[in-house]
Every structure is written in C-alpha cells, then in structure tokens.
Image (cartoon, grey):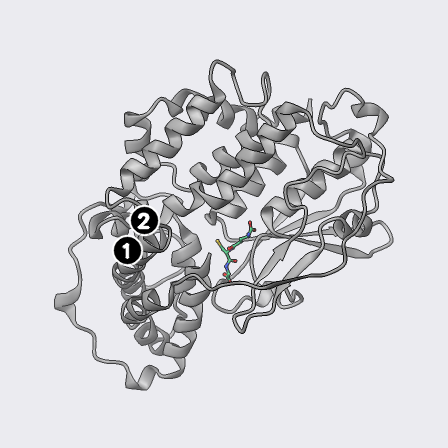
C-alpha cells in the first residue's frame, strides 16, 4: 500500500528532524471512545509503520506522526506508470502432477517434506493475512518472521521492499525468494499441482516488472496464473482468477477508509498497538492517538484516490454483497472446498475481523455464513486432506 511506504518515509524524516518538532499539544488528542478490549488485529499494515522506538527522542518523533501523515495524504495520488517487462518465461513444458490429474489441489506429504518456508510479514497486513489463509488452508509448513516496519532489519537481504516475502530453502541450502502475495499463491499452487518442483524455475514464470518512473514500483507478470501446463482455462478457473484480481484491485482498497472512517474507529484500530508490544505508557498513548489521528486523514485521501463513495460503508457492503452473489448457492466459490478466490476474500477480511467495519458488514450483508465456513476450513487445514 502506497500509504504504508509513505508513512515510513515520513516517520524517518520526522525522526531525523525531531529537534524541530512542535511541542505536543494535549488538546489535539482525542478521548478514547472505545476500549482496548474491543480492539483486535487491525490494520497494523498502517500502524506498525508508526511504531516508535523506546527512547524519549523517538517518542517525540512519534508525536509528529499525525502531522506527518496529514502531509503524507497530500502525496497519495496515482502516478502514471510506464512499465518495462523483464524477461518473459514460458511454462509450456510443465505437466500436471499425476496426483492432481483431476485438477484437485492438494499438498502431498512428499511435497510438504521438500519445503522449508519462511514468511516475512506484518501480522495484520491484509496481503499477509491473505497469504496465511492460503498457507494454512493447504497445510503448508512455514515459519513466521515478524518484520519491524520501521527498521526492517529482518528483510535487509531483500531488494523487494514490501511484505509478504516467502523464502524457500532447498535441501542444498539454496534460497529462493518469492515476492507479492498473489505471485506467491500462484507459484505455490503451481508447485502443488504440477511435476515442477524447482522453485527458481517456478519463480521465473512470474517475472518482475519494474516501473521506469522516478517513483520506483514493482509489478509481476502472470500474477494470477496457475501454470498447470494445460492450455486454456476452465470456466471455474476463469472465475477464480477474476475474483482474485478483484480482491487486490477493489476489496483491499475499501479497508483503510472503513477502519479509519472517523476518529473513534481510528482509535479502535490503533488501540491494538497499545495493547501489544513492549511500550511504556507514554509510548502507547502516542501510538494510539497520534497514529489514529494521522490515519483518519490519510484514509480520507485514499477514499478520494480510489473514488469511493462518501459513505464508505456502503462500498464495503456492496463488495460483500457482490461476493455473496458471485458465490451464489454454492458452499464456496470453489464448490465443496474454498478455491483461491475464497481464500483471498477471506484472508483480506480476516485482517479487520472484530472491528466495527467488519461487524457492521456482517449485520448488513449475508456474507457471515460463508465467512465462518471459510474460516473453519482454513483453521482446520481442510485443503491438506
Ligand atoms: N502487491 C503486494 C502488496 C504488498 C504491500 O503493499 N505490502 C505493504 C504492507 S501492507 C508493504 O510492505 N508496504 C511497504 C513497506 O512496508 O515498506 C502484495 O500483494 O503482496
């Protein structure tokens, strides 16, 4: 998310200029309207950016975040992108695994034993939640490394600047790095369903596309393609791909404007920070209120950027209804088991579970029963059977 990156840049610049920060204005702070008990794993993909250090100096920088984020909202605008396509790899030689000739997706024990996966993530980033839903459903074994969003020491090895990142360590000790939640999901599905087990080769099917603009950005070709080795796609594969794209291009953009919709909801979201991590009382206070205030304004800008209706809830309800209609009478879009679209929608929505926006959506739409079914399937690793 653009805001996430922008927020960190501002945090750093504020940190560098902390001596010039204005003194803290208590009157500007908002009263807590929702207790920490109501808070849960909320959009840490924003707030983690704002996690201050442990010193008083960093605390001062933290106080400035709200101002910084206000300024950052001005910077949140679409940049025209001119992409340069790197190499285009061919997956023509792939053959569907004999274990999956029916198109069934399963992680076999043999495949699982080849894997040594490490997920670099922010716990509540919607893209990371989406990837974890996929990994958990299929029962992929993986270790988690929680990334400190300010210092990012854990991902210093990576040129790619975002999370999630998944690293597979082969038996020879060679490491293969996979970037981008949707690419990783497509790559691992290719691994599961074909005879191709060489990660370097699988990764080469999803070549990186670098922006030539000043503002560097990265995309990936074939992001939503499962390299089955079979030409063409069935109707259900087309539907799955279409809704996976919808999750990344539509649904995910409805999240920040809804969870930071007003000061009290913004504080609800940020109170997760104050109830987690080793912060002293003042630090907790700053993170909760300054961050909440800043993101409230950034969310307004995002609303404009993505052309959302003023009533952002109606957009979220509309998305939930669109999805429910698309699933129709089926248990899941994938039929008896969730497919990749089910897992993607569930994963993104799970990043706001428990918040007002999520609860309102459950009350106002019929998405609840599908959501609970999918959650159960994910938690019970139903895809591994
Ligand atoms: N298209 C990427 C988007 C990932 C993304 O934007 N991640 C955010 C966290 S929610 C991020 O890492 N932002 C940059 C940063 O924190 O440095 C994906 O699906 O994985």
In the rendered image, which residue does mark 1 sit on? 300
Q: Residues within 10 Å of mark 1 (few under 14, many from 20)?
A: many
Residue at x 28% of width, y 38% of height:
313
* Secondary-structure class at tag 2: helix
Residue 345, percent from left and from top: 49, 34
**Mark 2 touches mark 1? (CB < 8 Å):** yes
Residue closest to the far bottom: 19
Residue at x 26% of width, y 48% of height:
261
In the rendered image, which residue does mark 2 sit on? 257
Residue 320: quarter of image: top left
Residue at x 40% of width, y 49% of height:
43
Viewed as shown, does residue 148 lie left or right of 294?
right
In front here: 8 or 249?
Answer: 249
In space, the residues marked 2 and 1 are separated at their CA atoms by: 6 Å
Residue 86: quarter of image: bottom right
Residue 40, percent from left and from top: 36, 43
Viewed as shown, does residue 134 lie left or right of 289?
right
Q: Please say if 258 is above or below 17.
A: above
* Viewer can see residue 372: no
Ligand 1 contact, mark 2 (Cβ < 8 Å): no
* Secondary-structure class at tag 1: helix
Residue closest to the far top: 329
Q: Residues within 10 Å of mark 2 (few under 14, many from 20)?
A: many
Residue at x 75% of width, y 34% of height:
192
Viewed as shown, does residue 236 lie left or right of 71?
right
Residue 41: quarter of image: top left
Q: Earlier in the sequence, mark 2 or mark 1?
A: 2
Residue 282, percent from left and from top: 27, 66
């Amino acid at each position: 998310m653009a805001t996430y990156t922008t927020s960190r840049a501002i945090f750093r610049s504020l940190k560098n200029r902390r001596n010039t920060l204005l003194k803290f204005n208590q009157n500007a702070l908002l009263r807590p309207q929702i207790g920490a008990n109501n808070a849960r794993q909320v959009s840490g993909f924003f707030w983690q950016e704002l996690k201050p250090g442990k010193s008083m100096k960093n605390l001062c920088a933290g106080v400035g975040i709200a101002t910084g984020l206000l300024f950052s909202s001005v910077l949140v605008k679409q940049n025209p992108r001119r992409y340069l396509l790197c190499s285009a790899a061919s997956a023509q030689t792939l053959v569907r695994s004999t274990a999956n000739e029916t198109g069934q997706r399963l992680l076999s024990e043999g495949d699982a034993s080849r894997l040594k996966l490490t997920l670099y993530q922010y716990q509540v980033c919607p893209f990371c939640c989406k990837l974890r839903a996929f990994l958990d459903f299929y029962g992929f074994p993986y270790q988690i490394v929680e990334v400190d969003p300010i210092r990012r020491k854990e991902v210093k090895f990576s040129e790619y600047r975002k999370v999630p990142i998944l690293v597979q360590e082969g038996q020879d000790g060679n490491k293969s790095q996979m970037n981008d939640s949707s690419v990783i999901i497509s790559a691992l599905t290719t691994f599961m369903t074909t005879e191709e087990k060489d990660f370097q080769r699988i990764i080469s099917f999803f070549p990186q596309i670098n922006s030539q603009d000043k503002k560097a950005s990265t995309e990936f070709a074939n992001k939503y393609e499962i390299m089955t080795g079979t030409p063409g796609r069935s109707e259900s594969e087309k539907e799955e791909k279409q809704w996976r794209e919808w999750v990344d291009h539509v649904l995910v953009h409805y999240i920040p404007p809804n969870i930071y919709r007003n000061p009290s909801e913004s504080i609800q979201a940020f109170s997760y920070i104050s109830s987690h991590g080793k912060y002293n009382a003042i630090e907790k206070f700053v993170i909760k209120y300054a961050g909440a205030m800043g993101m409230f304004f950034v969310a307004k800008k995002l609303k404009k950027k993505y052309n959302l209706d003023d009533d952002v809830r109606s957009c979220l309800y509309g998305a939930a209804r669109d999805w429910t209609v698309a699933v129709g009478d089926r248990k899941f879009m994938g039929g008896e088991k969730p497919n990749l679209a089910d897992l993607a929608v569930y994963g993104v929505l799970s990043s706001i579970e428990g918040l007002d926006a999520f609860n309102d959506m459950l009350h106002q739409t019929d998405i609840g029963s599908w959501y609970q079914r999918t959650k159960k399937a994910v938690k019970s690793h139903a895809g591994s059977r």
